[in-house]
Amino acid sequence: MLKLPLNCYDESGRILPPKWYYWLCGFLCIDWLVFVLSLASREHTTELLSFFYPSRSGLIVSLVTSMPILTSLVLVSQRERLWKKSWLKWSSAIMPLLVLGTSGLISAQLYHLFIEHWRFEWVSAIRITGAVLCIYVFLKSRHLHYMRNDWLAL
């Protein structure tokens, strides 16, 4: 008896990460996307970065705090290569990395609000609410729980 629908498994019978996992990680790593896209335009890099991040420290804090989420995303996307090299223990670090990174992003947004003297900003409100919902989804997802246990059993 399968725990999940058949389309949630790969050819080897291992549970695949859910599609929404990539979307949530993309939402949480939006700072990296903005950074990379601003670097793609060489003439306007400083203008784009100053538009999204008026203070340079805000960009650095956002990039550093989202690093665990980016690491988790890279680990999951490179799982086949890691399994071929017989590296199996990394899969137990996925959930702690997600929770640590998301908590860091919440802390960074609260720090930004503190610097702005708690002035309401829609971007900060959406990011904090989204991050709290992401932590809830990550911790309560049966799919991620089954996936982690399946990958640990390799």
Image (cartoon, grey):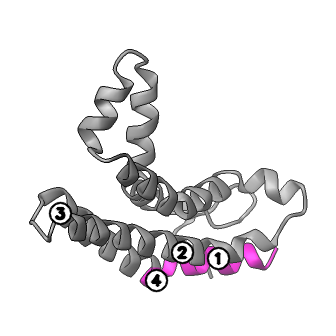
Residue 137, position in %: x, y? 39, 77
Q: Going from the N terminus, do you reach mark 3 or mark 2 first?
A: 3
Q: Is the residue marked by circle 1 packed among few (<14), some (14-19), or many (20+) residues within 10 Å? A: some
Can you tell which of label 3 and label 2 is closer to the viewer? Answer: 3
Q: Going from the N terminus, do you reach mark 3 or mark 1 first?
A: 3
Main secondary structure type of the part rendered in magenta? helix
Q: Does the residue at mark 4 contact the one at mark 2 (Cβ under 8 Å)?
A: no
Residue 25, position in %: x, y? 45, 58
Cα–Cα span, label 4 and label 1: 12 Å
For residue 75, say whether it is visible. Answer: yes
Q: Residue at x 10, y 66 (%)?
A: 119
Residue 120, position in %: x, y? 9, 65
Say the numbered circle drawn on residue 148.
1
Quarter of the picture containing the N terminus is bottom right
Say the numbered circle drawn on residue 116.
3
Cα–Cα span, label 1 and label 2: 6 Å
Q: Going from the N terminus, do you reach mark 4 or mark 2 first?
A: 4
